[in-house]
Protein backbone atom coordinates (compact mmCIF):
# COMPACT_ATOMS: atom_id res chain seq x y z
CA UNK A 1 0.00 0.00 0.00
CA UNK A 2 1.16 3.51 -0.80
CA UNK A 3 0.58 4.98 2.66
CA UNK A 4 -0.22 8.39 4.10
CA UNK A 5 2.58 10.21 5.92
CA UNK A 6 2.95 12.38 8.98
CA UNK A 7 5.82 13.42 11.24
CA UNK A 8 7.41 11.10 13.77
CA UNK A 9 8.21 13.81 16.33
CA UNK A 10 7.55 17.49 17.05
CA UNK A 11 9.87 20.14 15.59
CA UNK A 12 9.94 23.96 15.74
CA UNK A 13 11.07 26.97 13.72
CA UNK A 14 11.32 30.70 14.42
CA UNK A 15 11.65 33.45 11.83
CA UNK A 16 10.30 36.68 10.36
CA UNK A 17 7.32 37.06 8.07
CA UNK A 18 8.49 38.51 4.75
CA UNK A 19 5.62 41.03 4.58
CA UNK A 20 4.78 41.87 8.19
CA UNK A 21 8.36 41.55 9.44
CA UNK A 22 7.18 40.11 12.77
CA UNK A 23 8.87 37.27 14.63
CA UNK A 24 6.74 34.12 14.45
CA UNK A 25 7.20 30.63 15.93
CA UNK A 26 6.00 27.44 14.25
CA UNK A 27 5.51 24.08 15.97
CA UNK A 28 5.03 21.10 13.65
CA UNK A 29 3.17 18.12 15.14
CA UNK A 30 2.13 14.66 13.90
CA UNK A 31 -1.55 14.32 12.96
CA UNK A 32 -4.00 11.41 12.49
CA UNK A 33 -4.80 9.83 9.12
CA UNK A 34 -7.17 11.73 6.84
CA UNK A 35 -6.89 14.92 8.92
CA UNK A 36 -4.88 16.86 6.32
CA UNK A 37 -2.74 19.90 7.08
CA UNK A 38 -4.17 22.24 9.72
CA UNK A 39 -2.76 25.52 11.06
CA UNK A 40 -3.64 26.59 14.62
CA UNK A 41 -3.36 30.28 15.54
CA UNK A 42 -2.19 29.77 19.12
CA UNK A 43 -1.50 33.48 19.73
CA UNK A 44 -5.22 34.27 19.88
CA UNK A 45 -7.19 34.31 23.19
CA UNK A 46 -8.95 31.18 21.93
CA UNK A 47 -6.80 29.14 19.49
CA UNK A 48 -8.32 28.96 16.00
CA UNK A 49 -7.80 25.98 13.69
CA UNK A 50 -7.68 26.68 9.94
CA UNK A 51 -7.64 23.67 7.63
CA UNK A 52 -5.68 23.95 4.40
CA UNK A 53 -8.31 23.63 1.65
CA UNK A 54 -9.32 25.50 -1.53
CA UNK A 55 -12.39 26.97 0.19
CA UNK A 56 -10.34 28.42 3.07
CA UNK A 57 -8.16 30.52 0.73
CA UNK A 58 -9.17 34.12 1.43
CA UNK A 59 -6.46 36.15 -0.33
CA UNK A 60 -3.98 35.51 -3.14
CA UNK A 61 -2.34 38.92 -3.48
CA UNK A 62 1.45 38.49 -3.18
CA UNK A 63 0.99 35.15 -1.36
CA UNK A 64 -1.59 32.49 -0.49
CA UNK A 65 -3.61 33.24 2.66
CA UNK A 66 -6.17 31.06 4.46
CA UNK A 67 -8.95 31.91 6.94
CA UNK A 68 -11.77 29.87 8.50
CA UNK A 69 -14.38 29.39 5.79
CA UNK A 70 -12.39 31.70 3.50
CA UNK A 71 -13.59 34.76 5.43
CA UNK A 72 -11.24 37.68 4.59
CA UNK A 73 -12.15 39.35 7.90
CA UNK A 74 -11.43 36.30 10.03
CA UNK A 75 -8.20 35.09 11.66
CA UNK A 76 -5.70 34.25 8.93
CA UNK A 77 -2.42 32.58 8.11
CA UNK A 78 -0.48 34.22 5.27
CA UNK A 79 2.29 33.07 2.95
CA UNK A 80 1.70 29.33 3.30
CA UNK A 81 2.92 28.31 -0.16
CA UNK A 82 6.62 27.60 0.56
CA UNK A 83 5.77 25.40 3.55
CA UNK A 84 3.07 23.56 1.60
CA UNK A 85 5.51 23.05 -1.25
CA UNK A 86 7.92 21.37 1.18
CA UNK A 87 5.08 19.17 2.47
CA UNK A 88 4.24 18.12 -1.10
CA UNK A 89 7.90 17.43 -1.90
CA UNK A 90 8.19 15.18 1.16
CA UNK A 91 4.84 13.48 0.57
CA UNK A 92 3.37 14.68 3.88
CA UNK A 93 -0.41 14.28 4.13
CA UNK A 94 -1.28 14.99 7.77
CA UNK A 95 0.22 17.72 9.93
CA UNK A 96 -0.76 20.17 12.67
CA UNK A 97 1.14 23.48 12.60
CA UNK A 98 0.83 25.74 15.64
CA UNK A 99 1.70 29.30 14.63
CA UNK A 100 2.19 32.29 16.95
CA UNK A 101 1.25 34.97 14.40
CA UNK A 102 -0.54 35.50 11.11
CA UNK A 103 2.34 34.91 8.68
CA UNK A 104 4.51 31.85 8.06
CA UNK A 105 8.19 32.85 8.47
CA UNK A 106 10.03 33.33 5.19
CA UNK A 107 13.28 31.78 6.56
CA UNK A 108 15.69 31.82 3.57
CA UNK A 109 13.00 32.60 0.97
CA UNK A 110 12.78 29.05 -0.35
CA UNK A 111 11.34 25.73 0.84
CA UNK A 112 14.73 24.24 1.75
CA UNK A 113 14.66 25.14 5.46
CA UNK A 114 11.18 23.64 5.82
CA UNK A 115 12.34 20.45 4.09
CA UNK A 116 15.29 20.19 6.49
CA UNK A 117 13.15 20.80 9.59
CA UNK A 118 10.45 18.34 8.60
CA UNK A 119 12.88 15.61 7.59
CA UNK A 120 14.83 16.11 10.82
CA UNK A 121 11.62 15.38 12.76
CA UNK A 122 11.31 12.06 10.93
CA UNK A 123 8.63 11.06 8.46
CA UNK A 124 6.32 8.24 9.50
CA UNK A 125 4.15 5.98 7.36
CA UNK A 126 0.56 5.66 8.56
CA UNK A 127 -1.86 2.77 8.36
CA UNK A 128 -4.08 4.27 5.65
CA UNK A 129 -3.78 4.61 1.89
CA UNK A 130 -2.58 7.93 0.48
CA UNK A 131 -5.30 9.48 -1.64
CA UNK A 132 -4.57 11.38 -4.85
CA UNK A 133 -6.61 13.79 -6.96
CA UNK A 134 -6.39 12.26 -10.44
CA UNK A 135 -7.25 14.70 -13.23
CA UNK A 136 -9.46 13.03 -15.84
CA UNK A 137 -9.94 15.87 -18.34
CA UNK A 138 -8.20 19.13 -19.13
CA UNK A 139 -9.15 22.21 -17.10
CA UNK A 140 -7.76 25.67 -17.91
CA UNK A 141 -7.88 29.23 -16.61
CA UNK A 142 -6.87 32.14 -18.86
CA UNK A 143 -6.72 35.85 -18.08
CA UNK A 144 -5.71 38.91 -20.10
CA UNK A 145 -4.78 39.35 -23.73
CA UNK A 146 -1.61 40.05 -25.69
CA UNK A 147 1.30 40.97 -23.43
CA UNK A 148 -1.00 40.67 -20.39
CA UNK A 149 -2.00 37.08 -21.19
CA UNK A 150 -1.42 34.45 -18.51
CA UNK A 151 -2.81 30.97 -18.16
CA UNK A 152 -2.62 27.73 -16.21
CA UNK A 153 -3.84 24.26 -17.16
CA UNK A 154 -4.24 20.81 -15.59
CA UNK A 155 -4.31 17.76 -17.87
CA UNK A 156 -4.49 13.99 -17.27
CA UNK A 157 -1.14 12.34 -16.56
CA UNK A 158 -0.07 9.18 -14.70
CA UNK A 159 2.28 11.08 -12.41
CA UNK A 160 2.78 14.71 -11.48
CA UNK A 161 4.69 16.98 -13.82
CA UNK A 162 4.83 20.78 -13.67
CA UNK A 163 5.89 22.92 -16.63
CA UNK A 164 6.20 26.67 -16.13
CA UNK A 165 7.27 29.55 -18.36
CA UNK A 166 7.92 33.11 -17.20
CA UNK A 167 8.56 36.30 -19.15
CA UNK A 168 10.18 39.25 -17.39
CA UNK A 169 11.72 42.15 -19.31
CA UNK A 170 14.84 42.28 -17.16
CA UNK A 171 18.44 41.49 -18.25
CA UNK A 172 19.15 39.14 -15.34
CA UNK A 173 15.95 37.17 -15.90
CA UNK A 174 16.19 36.98 -19.69
CA UNK A 175 19.78 35.72 -19.29
CA UNK A 176 18.48 32.84 -17.18
CA UNK A 177 16.34 29.86 -18.11
CA UNK A 178 12.70 30.96 -18.25
CA UNK A 179 11.02 27.60 -18.88
CA UNK A 180 11.33 24.49 -16.73
CA UNK A 181 9.56 21.14 -16.63
CA UNK A 182 9.84 19.14 -13.40
CA UNK A 183 8.67 15.62 -12.57
CA UNK A 184 7.64 15.19 -8.92
CA UNK A 185 8.30 11.45 -9.24
CA UNK A 186 11.97 12.08 -10.05
CA UNK A 187 13.01 12.25 -6.39
CA UNK A 188 14.88 15.50 -7.10
CA UNK A 189 12.57 18.03 -5.43
CA UNK A 190 15.06 18.76 -2.63
CA UNK A 191 17.96 19.12 -5.05
CA UNK A 192 16.34 20.85 -8.02
CA UNK A 193 13.41 22.92 -6.68
CA UNK A 194 13.39 23.39 -2.89
CA UNK A 195 16.33 25.85 -2.77
CA UNK A 196 14.85 28.32 -5.29
CA UNK A 197 14.20 31.66 -3.52
CA UNK A 198 11.50 34.24 -3.99
CA UNK A 199 12.57 37.34 -5.92
CA UNK A 200 11.69 40.99 -6.18
CA UNK A 201 12.79 44.25 -7.76
CA UNK A 202 14.61 46.95 -5.79
CA UNK A 203 12.51 49.63 -7.54
CA UNK A 204 9.34 48.11 -5.98
CA UNK A 205 10.59 48.04 -2.37
CA UNK A 206 9.40 51.53 -1.37
CA UNK A 207 5.95 51.02 -2.87
CA UNK A 208 5.55 47.65 -1.13
CA UNK A 209 6.57 49.01 2.25
CA UNK A 210 4.20 51.94 1.84
CA UNK A 211 1.43 49.33 1.62
CA UNK A 212 2.72 47.46 4.68
CA UNK A 213 4.39 44.71 2.65
CA UNK A 214 7.94 43.41 2.41
CA UNK A 215 8.92 44.56 5.91
CA UNK A 216 10.76 41.31 6.64
CA UNK A 217 12.43 41.04 3.23
CA UNK A 218 16.20 41.30 2.86
CA UNK A 219 18.97 39.85 0.74
CA UNK A 220 19.06 36.98 3.26
CA UNK A 221 15.67 35.75 2.07
CA UNK A 222 14.90 37.40 -1.30
CA UNK A 223 16.71 37.59 -4.63
CA UNK A 224 16.86 41.36 -5.20
CA UNK A 225 17.05 42.60 -8.77
CA UNK A 226 18.51 46.03 -9.53
CA UNK A 227 18.17 47.76 -12.89
CA UNK A 228 20.43 45.32 -14.70
CA UNK A 229 21.60 42.53 -12.37
CA UNK A 230 21.08 40.41 -9.28
CA UNK A 231 22.25 42.44 -6.26
CA UNK A 232 22.76 39.50 -3.86
CA UNK A 233 26.45 38.92 -3.26
CA UNK A 234 26.25 35.17 -3.87
CA UNK A 235 24.25 35.44 -7.09
CA UNK A 236 21.79 32.70 -8.02
CA UNK A 237 21.56 29.18 -6.59
CA UNK A 238 20.35 27.79 -9.94
CA UNK A 239 20.85 29.18 -13.44
CA UNK A 240 17.06 29.13 -13.75
CA UNK A 241 16.20 30.00 -10.13
CA UNK A 242 13.46 32.52 -11.06
CA UNK A 243 11.25 30.06 -12.92
CA UNK A 244 12.08 27.25 -10.47
CA UNK A 245 10.71 29.41 -7.67
CA UNK A 246 7.50 29.78 -9.66
CA UNK A 247 7.28 25.98 -9.83
CA UNK A 248 7.96 25.81 -6.08
CA UNK A 249 5.07 28.24 -5.50
CA UNK A 250 2.76 26.32 -7.84
CA UNK A 251 3.48 23.05 -6.02
CA UNK A 252 2.48 24.77 -2.76
CA UNK A 253 -0.58 26.48 -4.25
CA UNK A 254 -1.89 23.19 -5.67
CA UNK A 255 -1.18 21.30 -2.42
CA UNK A 256 -3.93 23.49 -0.95
CA UNK A 257 -6.19 20.80 -2.46
CA UNK A 258 -5.31 18.64 0.55
CA UNK A 259 -4.20 15.69 -1.57
CA UNK A 260 -1.33 15.26 -4.04
CA UNK A 261 -2.08 15.61 -7.74
CA UNK A 262 -1.87 13.13 -10.58
CA UNK A 263 -1.75 15.58 -13.46
CA UNK A 264 0.38 17.61 -15.82
CA UNK A 265 0.26 21.26 -14.73
CA UNK A 266 1.32 23.74 -17.41
CA UNK A 267 1.47 27.50 -16.86
CA UNK A 268 2.53 30.72 -18.48
CA UNK A 269 3.06 33.73 -16.18
CA UNK A 270 0.64 32.28 -13.62
CA UNK A 271 0.61 33.19 -9.93
CA UNK A 272 -1.15 32.45 -6.64
CA UNK A 273 -4.52 33.87 -7.73
CA UNK A 274 -4.71 32.02 -11.05
CA UNK A 275 -3.46 28.78 -9.47
CA UNK A 276 -6.25 28.94 -6.88
CA UNK A 277 -8.88 29.71 -9.53
CA UNK A 278 -7.64 26.72 -11.55
CA UNK A 279 -7.87 24.46 -8.51
CA UNK A 280 -11.38 25.63 -7.68
CA UNK A 281 -12.48 25.14 -11.30
CA UNK A 282 -11.15 21.59 -11.28
CA UNK A 283 -12.82 20.65 -8.00
CA UNK A 284 -16.14 22.23 -9.05
CA UNK A 285 -16.40 19.74 -11.95
CA UNK A 286 -16.87 16.20 -10.58
CA UNK A 287 -16.34 14.80 -14.08
CA UNK A 288 -12.87 16.38 -14.25
CA UNK A 289 -11.24 14.32 -11.48
CA UNK A 290 -11.54 11.36 -9.17
CA UNK A 291 -9.89 10.31 -5.91
CA UNK A 292 -7.62 7.27 -6.16
CA UNK A 293 -5.24 5.30 -3.96
CA UNK A 294 -2.80 2.46 -4.63
CA UNK A 295 -3.16 -0.71 -2.57
CA UNK A 296 -0.15 -2.02 -4.46
CA UNK A 297 2.54 0.67 -4.51
CA UNK A 298 3.86 -0.82 -7.76
CA UNK A 299 0.74 0.50 -9.51
CA UNK A 300 1.59 4.08 -8.53
CA UNK A 301 3.55 6.35 -10.90
CA UNK A 302 7.29 5.70 -10.92
CA UNK A 303 9.07 7.27 -7.94
CA UNK A 304 5.95 8.11 -5.95
CA UNK A 305 6.60 5.57 -3.21
CA UNK A 306 10.02 7.18 -2.67
CA UNK A 307 9.15 10.89 -2.68
CA UNK A 308 11.27 11.21 0.48
CA UNK A 309 12.76 8.70 2.90
CA UNK A 310 10.36 7.53 5.61
CA UNK A 311 12.06 6.32 8.75
Image (cartoon, rainbow, N blue to C red):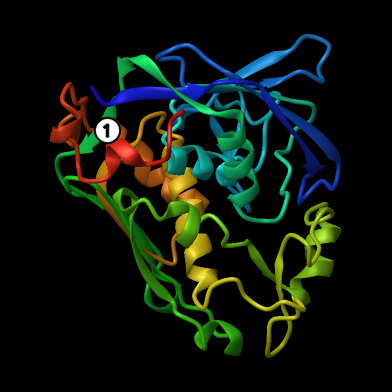
Tell me what residue is drawn at x 61 percent, y 26 percent: 71
Residue 157 percent location from the top left of the image = 17, 48
- Tell me the quarter of the picture where residue 9 sits: top right
Q: Is residue 5 above or below residue 169?
A: above
What residue is shown with label 1?
133
- Tell me the quarter of the picture where residue 280 sits: top left
Q: Residues within 10 Å of mark 1 (few under 14, many from 20)?
A: some
Front position in the image: 83 or 138: 83
Q: Is residue 193 left or right of residue 121?
A: left
How many labels, in total? 1
Q: Is residue 261 above or below residue 76?
A: below
Mark yes or no: residue 140 visible. no
**Which residue is situated farthest in the front direction here?**
311
Image quadrant occupied by the N terminus: top left
Residue 168 percent location from the top left of the image = 53, 79
Q: Is residue 137 above or below residue 69?
A: below
Mark yes or no: residue 305 visible. yes
Residue 22 percent location from the top left of the image = 86, 42
Tell me what residue is drawn at x 55 percent, y 29 percent: 122
Front position in the image: 238 or 52: 238
Q: Is residue 178 left or right of residue 266?
A: right
Tell me what residue is drawn at x 15 percent, y 44 percent: 137
Residue 293 percent location from the top left of the image = 21, 25
Amino acid sequence: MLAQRTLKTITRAVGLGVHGGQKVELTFKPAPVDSGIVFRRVDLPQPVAIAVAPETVSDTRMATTISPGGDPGGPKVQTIEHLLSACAGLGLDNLVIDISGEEVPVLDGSAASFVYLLQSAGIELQNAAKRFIRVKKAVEMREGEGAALKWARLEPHHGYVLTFEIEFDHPAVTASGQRVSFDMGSGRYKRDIARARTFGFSKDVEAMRAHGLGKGGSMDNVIVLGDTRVLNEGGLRYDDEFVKHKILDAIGDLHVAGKPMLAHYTAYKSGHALNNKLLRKLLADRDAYDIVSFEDARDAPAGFAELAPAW
